[in-house]
Image (cartoon, grey):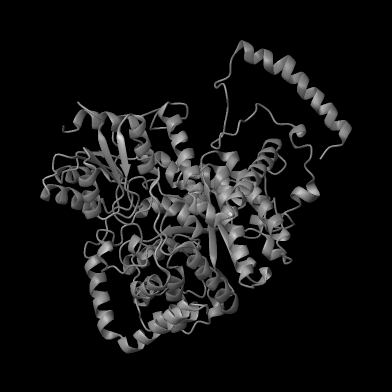
Amino acid sequence: MYGEKEIKRIEERRKKWDEEIYRPLVEKRPERLKRFANLSWTEIGPLYTPTDIKDFDYGKRSGNPGEFPYLRGIHSTMYRGRTWTMRQFAGFGTAEETNRRYKYLLEHGETGLSVAFDYPTLYGYDTDHPLARGEFGKCGVAISSLKDMELLFKDIPVDRITTSMTINGPAPIVWAFYIANADNQNIPRSHIGGTIQNDVLKEYIAQKSFIFPPAPSMRLTVDTFEFGFREIPRWNTISISGYHIREAGSTAVQELAFTLADGFAYVKAAMERGMDIDQFAPRLSFFFNAHNDFFEEIAKYRAARRIWANGMKDLGATKQRSMLMRFHTQTAGVSLTAQQPEINLVRVAIQALAAVMGGTQSLHTNSMDEALALPSEKAVRLALRTQQIIEEETGVANTADPLGGSYYLEWLTDRMEEETMRYFDRIEGFGGVVPAIEKGFFQRELAEASYKLQQEYERGERITVGVNKYQMDEKMEIPILRMDERGEEIQLNRLKKLRKDRDNGKMDKALERLRRAAEGDENTMPYILDCVHAYATLGETCQVLRDVFGEYEEPAIF
Amino acid sequence: MEGQIRVLVAKPGLDGHDRGAKIVARALRDAGMEVIYTGIHQTAEMIVNTALQEDVDVVGLSLLSGAHMTLFRDVTEILKERDMGDILVIGGGIIPEEDIPDLKDAGIDGVFGPGTPLEDIVKFIRENVKR
């Protein structure tokens, strides 16, 4: 950025400032802390100057927005052209109740949908499965068949709105429900758009809603890549997710490193299948957390784009679209407090601002009541309004990467990239992501980091406002969402009727064909679509795959 | 009191949020207790069986999915059926304030929501363990 002579001059001045002004002052009046550190325990200095980024080559390491390596954003106009998609993750109870919530959100200016499924659905079980006990509709909507999907999107134009679905183990089946719903409305498959999370690697690492062992899981994922490329070109067939890794206890650096390592593992798996990298890479998307340390989060998104672009180029990508990282962001659920829940609004606003400063493509802002229960309608509206204030009132969307070039931010971005590379080496040392999972590497890293951080809060070395400082005894009452109590019964009756009314002979044949495809090496997606079109349920279809692939069990370590 | 307090930390149901359970397990171990962690995806039946085999004094249940009213109660009911009602049962997770009285009626001796200092849990166990 600066010539050698100029850097030398700045270095001398920086040294002089340190010796003559800063140090003497600190000796007289000590600073608030002995050591300042961010949430990844990276020590933060008192001042950053051009000398901290003296190797920063703007052409190679930054470039302009929309230019390789996309440090400053993936579009040349960034939010001046179009702002991010406001996509609130929502789902509870029956398909009908959640359909009403979606319409409410759309009426209030939401621009994309995002489906939260309940636990049985996430594990590929129907509502009437014994393990579904107590879980119906609790932390998402229950979707057991195409019938439920039809009700979930009733009167919502799936050819004009994009939908993100947080589903992993049974992602191919739930995606098939969505496709079949469009098929039945005669909407061409090329007109529907959205995202399935479909990131099984992070399930073993963090979120834990895995079903099958890693190898068949990876095979199903690549099946969706292939099918998406052939038939549903506007669909993001995966959302490679750091969000859950962070929520499960990682640092920001670990979130960055493990997510990107997962991303490259999927790329290599698809290439091993014989796919051309430029066929599937444009439909890979990412999902990150927005946590409390403002600059660390912004640096994380920027570093992610640069590492991804360079890595994809090295793997042989030639299309621009294959190298740019598009990502969704959600504010940190784990940072919300049950104490003084209203102050969560403020936390969320700051976290959301970091995501926007980092150039996110879509954003979910958490509701203030989520440390207590599913969000109420009012809490969700306030969360959405937070995004609208950032968009309409603050002016931060007027220029691309407004903090780019900050000495501190660029230093931190470089530093996070270096630490990520060190993690890549360690993962490579295990033989890749899957062997590292099998040896418990990620799980141990997360458990260590989260316990260490928790102890610092316990000792009062770190502060959570309202929890270990500025506490209040008085209870703050906020309304809690209550669901339709008859919901489970409605759902159970619907399932019973479905099993009676459908052509069971036709369905059995479709399931049998899927079994044969799964046992062989054909792409399973067309067979899964045949099953769901014949109204086979999620549980029935998933059971076929369970029989063929087996189930994964995690060792219990803490 | 003789010997270490034995605690089973358990994750009932399908919920995979295990950060809290693991942190509590480590904190109890660091506080000198003998801790057994079940891992995720446990039925009430499995939890009670482990509690019996491991001869524990305390069962700590962690659930963030919202199914606590059903799944916590399942555990205490089976414990009662098997004459293991003297085991101290505590729970934590995303639990609305208004559910706490019902949980206590169902035999959950202590409920610890987000933001609870780990020390409070240690202290509660030491003061209330029934042996």
Image position of A486 with respect to A192: above or below: above
Q: Position of residue A52 (x, y in %)?
A: 74, 34
Q: Is residue A310 visible?
A: yes
- Residue under the point 38% across and 70% down: A546
Front in this rendered view, residue A157 or A554: A554
Image position of A134 with respect to A172: above or below: above
Q: Position of residue A447 (x, y in %)?
A: 45, 42
Quadrant in which the C terminus of chain A is drawn: top left
Q: Is residue A473 visible?
A: no
Q: Position of residue A354 (x, y in %)?
A: 57, 45
Q: Is residue B36 left or right of residue A240?
A: left
Image position of A220 with respect to A199: above or below: below
- Residue under the point 68% across and 12% down: A24
Image position of A143 with respect to A408: above or below: below
Front in this rendered view, residue A108 or A61: A61
Please identify the quarter of the rendering in which residue A5 is found: top right
Q: Is residue A308 left or right of residue B77?
A: right
Residue furthest out toward the right: A5
Please identify the quarter of the rendering in which residue A312 is found: bottom right
